[in-house]
Amino acid sequence: MRDSSQPTRERILQAAGKLFHHDGIRAISVDAIAEKAGVTKRTLYYHFRSKDDLIAAHLQARDEPNLALFKRWFDEAEGNAAERIAGIFRHLAQSARNARWKGCGFLRTSVELVNLPGHPALVAARAHKKRLEDWLCSVLAEAGVNGDTSSLARQVMLLLDGSFAVVLLHRDPSYMETAAEAVVRLIAERLPDAKANGAARKARHDRRDQ
Amino acid sequence: MRDSSQPTRERILQAAGKLFHHDGIRAISVDAIAEKAGVTKRTLYYHFRSKDDLIAAHLQARDEPNLALFKRWFDEAEGNAAERIAGIFRHLAQSARNARWKGCGFLRTSVELVNLPGHPALVAARAHKKRLEDWLCSVLAEAGVNGDTSSLARQVMLLLDGSFAVVLLHRDPSYMETAAEAVVRLIAERLPDAKANGAARKARHDRRDQ
DNA sequence: TTGTGTATATTCACTACCCGGTATACATTG
DNA sequence: CAATGTATACCGGGTAGTGAATATACACAA
């Protein structure tokens, strides 16, 4: 593929990203995206086979950067694993205070396409969430969490996606602080370096029994 | 309003409910609703001022029954408050195993209307979720939960709406069992009748200090 | 260097259709 | 008659997607 083709495709994806995020994929027309990108609709259809293809490509393009952002927030946070994961939620709360914040594009897309089971964008959305959950699972395992780390990672995902949904509905970012508290409570007592904590001692004891 | 007007209006609402739930509000046309209800579009517009009005009326009509269902699931469950709230999640998991299950209509509507901030349906959706959270809060308070019951109710709501979102995305009801586990862990250690539990003893001790 | 073929990239104008909502006339009932 | 419903037929506007022509860039031959 030629170099000069990249910018145009990128510009279309960027324009689509902004508009999709702001109004939702069904509310935005192909014409609006083309206009925002400064190209003709016909050019858009040269780079993408259909609107559905464009939606899928948009989510695929967001996968990596989104994951990287979460990892950066985790890396930059201080404290044990529980506190650092909670840090992600606090960063999210900060983002959600911006009026333009519109929740999670992957989640929203999966809702908007609920009646199209095989849609490629749904596949991309699921893959993204799965990758995030797997990363959380590995982080918890590395932190030496007792018991079933994959179950704990799923609980964190429930709180994360719950935050996206609830904050979008109520437009109240404080729910993300609430989620952060829950995350700490669920993880902290399972960490090996929990000090003088009855529950943690009991957990370690249980594990020794097996 | 006349008696004979009620069935027609009801039939329209019921048809709209089924179609909205199955495909989403933006994917369903007014014509489709009218046809499903067995009336002409003009009749529909006699009973409802606009499609937006119909959407809002639909959510308002679902508010009470939905709440009642959750309360019934709670009442019919056995065990302490934590177990009975977890019972709601297990009932939800059972529902979600049905292929026709499509998540929470209130949540989905709030996503589909994200670009229309003042939409009456959004008001209805928020009111419903608030009512549910308030009910949870009162249930927790009656169970004698230690500490901040409203914060705990918010955590349960995060897990509930997180379940709706995640299960809809992955089409995997087992996440609701995971949520049930998290609910039990978050609530149980705060219950006054927790036996020989170090964490619970600590919680009671903290409260005595204040 | 100049001409020519070819793949890439883009534009304008267009179709066929579906959408929410309505004007108007007709029916039923008290 | 008058109020409440219902039916047909229609409107303006927006939708995803396309046909045909054109512009650009570059390889290669004369």
Image: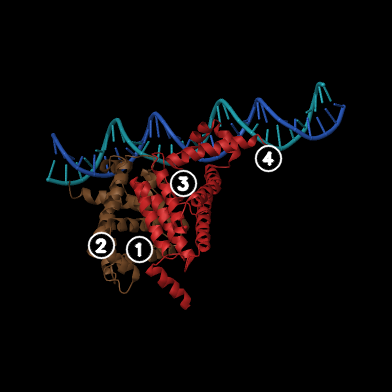
Chain colours: A red, B brown, C cyan, D blue
Quarter-of-image position of residue B192: bottom left
Q: Mark 2 points at which residue?
A: B209
Foreground mark, 1 or 4, reads 1
Residue B144 on image: x %, y %:
24, 65
Residue A120 is at least partly visible in this image: yes
Q: Which chain carries label 3?
A: A
How packed mark 2 is, by other alpha carbons closer than 10 Å (few <14, some 14-19, many 20 or more), is few
Mark 1–mark 4 distance (CA, rounded to whole Å): 54 Å
How packed mark 4 is, by other alpha carbons closer than 10 Å (few <14, some 14-19, many 20 or more), is few
* 2 or 1: tag closer to the N-terminus: 1
Q: Mark 3 points at which residue?
A: A105
Q: What element carries label 3?
A: helix
Mark 2–mark 3 distance (CA, rounded to whole Å): 45 Å
The amino acid pointed to by label 3 is Gly
Residue A10 on image: x %, y %:
58, 38
Quarter-of-image position of residue C27: top left
Q: Name the residue under label 4.
A: A1
Q: What element carries label 4?
A: loop
The amino acid pointed to by label 4 is Met
Q: Mark 2 lies on which chain?
A: B
Q: Do labels 2 and 1 share a chain?
A: yes
Say if mark 2 contacts mark 1, CB within 8 Å.
no
Q: Name the residue under label 1.
A: B186
Foreground mark, 2 or 4, reads 2
